[in-house]
Amino acid sequence: MAPRHFERTLKALGLSKAAAGRYLGISERTVHRYVDGEAEVPVSTVFWLRFLLEAGVKPKVPKRPRAVVVDNLSPTST
């Protein structure tokens, strides 16, 4: 899939680059590499995105994971 076509496909599905990364299980940087033509979009990803478009399905994107806050980093003594 050509980089411009990949980017248009994401837009047609209503996905930002960050959301596409979360949905596809890849980093946002990898999505940028696909869009910039620095990396080839895997065939499985192309098939999946085309299926979603043809079926008229909008992907459900997982929310960003929340940061875990650790209250105490010092070791406990017994």
Image (cartoon, rainbow, N blue to C red):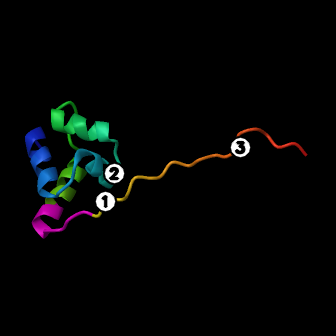
* Nearest to N terminus: mark 2 or mark 1: 2
* Nearest to N terminus: mark 1 or mark 3: 1
Q: Position of residue 12 (x, y in %)?
A: 11, 56
| Residue that label 3 marks | 72
**Residue lying at 22% horizontally and 49% vertically, measured from the top left:** 16
Work out how far the residue at label 2 is from the one at label 3, CA to CA, in angstroms: 30 Å
- Does 29 sit left or right of 75 as displayed? left
Three-letter code, disc 2: Arg
**Which residue is at the far right?**
78
Residue extent of the magenta highlight: 51-59
Question: For the residue labelled by badge 1, is the local secondary structure a helix, a strand or a loop?
Answer: loop
| Residue that label 2 marks | 22
| Residue 39 among magenta residues | no
Q: Which of the two discs, 1 and 3, sits closer to the camera? A: 3
Three-letter code, disc 3: Asn
Work out how far the residue at label 2 is from the one at label 1, CA to CA, in angstroms: 7 Å
Q: 10 Å neighbourhood of mark 1: few (<14), some, or many (≥20)?
A: some
Question: For the residue labelled by badge 2, is the local secondary structure a helix, a strand or a loop?
Answer: helix
* Nearest to N terminus: mark 2 or mark 3: 2
* Image quarter of residue 50: bottom left
| Residue 54 among magenta residues | yes
**Residue lying at 29% horizontally and 46% vertically, measured from the top left:** 18
Front residue (pair 27, 43): 27
Is the residue under label 1 in contact with that under label 2 (CB below 8 Å)?
yes
* Image quarter of residue 60: bottom left
Question: For the residue labelled by badge 3, is the local secondary structure a helix, a strand or a loop?
Answer: loop
Look at the image and tell me in which quarter the N terminus lies: top left
Label of residue 61 in the image: 1
Three-letter code, disc 1: Val
Q: Position of residue 65 (x, y in %)?
A: 45, 53
Front residue (pair 66, 39): 66
Q: Which of the two discs, 2 and 3, sits closer to the camera? A: 3
